[in-house]
Amino acid sequence: FSSLEQMQNLNTTMTNIYNYQTTNTLVSNAALIGKTVTALDSDGNTVTGKINAVGLSSDGKSALFSVVDSKNKTTVIEASNIIAVAQS
């Protein structure tokens, strides 16, 4: 292999690992759909509601959850801002 080929192969391998981790994160987080959580919104307010969707931030670094409260208001919460998950 030339150095260029080795770098290209390494880049492809790293991309595949990143894609696998992203998929794995989404699948793991999907298990929280339907669960009731308490979390902090982007303003620091406490939100309690059920998760109805999961996704990733635009940079792909943060898991995001769509939380619907008792008044049917939807708030997007970062995974790191979840305080508690209710046991069901």
Image: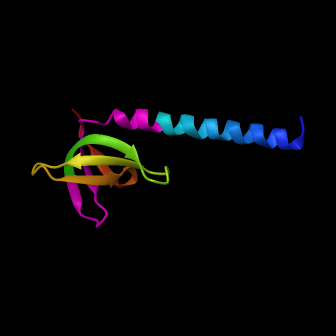
Q: Name the residue at 15% across, 53% down.
A: 73
The single residue placed furthest to the left in the displayed view is 71
Q: Residue furthest right?
A: 2
Position of 10 with respect to 39 (left or right) is right
Camera-nearest residue between 12 and 24:
12
Q: Residue at x 83, y 39 (%)?
A: 5
Report if residue 34 lies within the magenta region.
Answer: yes
Q: Residue 4 location, x and y as percent?
A: 84, 43
**Quadrant location of the C terminus?**
top left
User: Which image quadrant: the N terminus?
Assistant: top right
Outermost residue toward the bottom in this view: 43
Position of 5 with respect to 48 (left or right) is right
- Count numbered badges in the picture: 0
Position of 22 compared to 50: left or right?
Answer: right
The correct choice, above or below, for 42 with respect to 5 in the image is below
Q: Which residues are magenta?
A: 25-47
Task: Report the residue at 25% width, 45% height from top.
Answer: 37
**Residue 75 position in % (x across, y down):** 24, 54
Asked whether 85 or 5 is in front, the reply is 5
Q: Please determine whether, in this image, residue 61 is positioned above or below residue 33.
A: below
Measuring from the top left, give residue 11's x and y in whole percent.
71, 42
Q: Is residue 31 magenta?
A: yes
The part of the image, by quadrant, that contains residue 8 is top right
Establish if 34 lies above or below 37: above
Give the residue displayed 12% in from the left and 49% down from the top.
72
In x, y percent, where is residue 68?
19, 47
